[in-house]
């Protein structure tokens, strides 16, 4: 979609994606090798009573689900900012995540581009919010 096709208050719903224990461990092994993501024995003794997904993985999945809607298509140029990132609740193995995306701001730029800001709100299959964050991207007019 071009910049002119977005409007404030516009809402998009993504498909869902299930995170397995294997997905969580593989991601954490590469990008966030902390015990609560990798070591089931230690994780069970910790605050979350088991392995949880990295917040960075939750953010990445949220972004992936949004991009896969195809809303930006080939009109996206580049991301410009991420703000107010919040990991609201832990994500556990076999949680199924989906994201609701709302356009919250539009800023026309000189020339052929504009900035679209969206709020990503990600929920598990119990409809509990697990992640929230703002994303701004430059899009063709």
Image: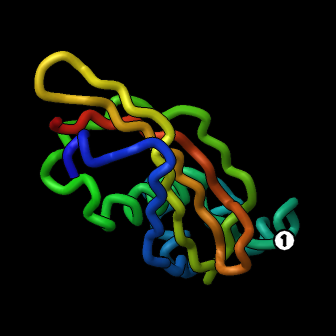
- Farthest residue, direction top: 110
| Badge 1: residue crowd in 10 Å (few <14, some 14–19, many ≥20) | some
User: In the rendered view, does 79 fall on the left or right side of 50?
Assistant: left
The residue depicted at 64 percent of the width and 67 percent of the height is 123
Count of numbered labels shown in the rendering: 1
Camera sees residue 73: yes
Comparing 97 with 94, the one in front is: 97
Percent coordinates x, y for residue 41 in the rendering: 77, 73
Residue lying at 59% horizontally and 61% vertically, measured from the top left: 122
Q: Residue at x 78, y 66 (%)?
A: 42
| Drawn side of residue 16 relative to residue 92, left or right | left
In the rendered image, residue 20, in percent from the top left (x then y), is placed at 55, 81
> How is colour applied across the structure in the image?
rainbow
- The residue carrying mark 1 is 49
Question: Does residue 71 sit above or below 84 in this rendering?
Answer: below
Percent x, y of residue 49:
84, 71
Location of residue 78 with respect to 24 vertically, above or below? above
* Residue sitting nearer the eye, 103 or 123: 103
Q: Which picture quadrant has residue 78? A: top left
- Residue 101 vs 98, above or below: the answer is above
């Amino acid at each position: 979609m071009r910049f002119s096709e977005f409007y404030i208050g516009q809402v998009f719903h993504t498909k869902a994606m299930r995170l397995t224990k294997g997905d969580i461990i593989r991601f954490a092994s590469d990008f966030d090798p902390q015990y609560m993501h990798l070591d089931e024995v230690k994780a069970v003794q910790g605050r979350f009573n088991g392995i949880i997904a990295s917040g960075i993985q939750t953010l990445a999945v949220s972004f992936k689900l949004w991009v896969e809607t195809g809303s930006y298509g080939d009109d996206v140029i580049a991301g410009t900012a991420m703000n107010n990132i919040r990991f609201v609740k832990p994500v556990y193995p076999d949680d199924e995540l989906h994201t609701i995306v709302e356009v919250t701001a539009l800023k026309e730029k000189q020339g052929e581009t504009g900035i679209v800001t969206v709020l990503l709100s990600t929920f598990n299959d119990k409809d509990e919010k697990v992640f929230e964050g703002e994303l701004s991207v430059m899009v063709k007019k």
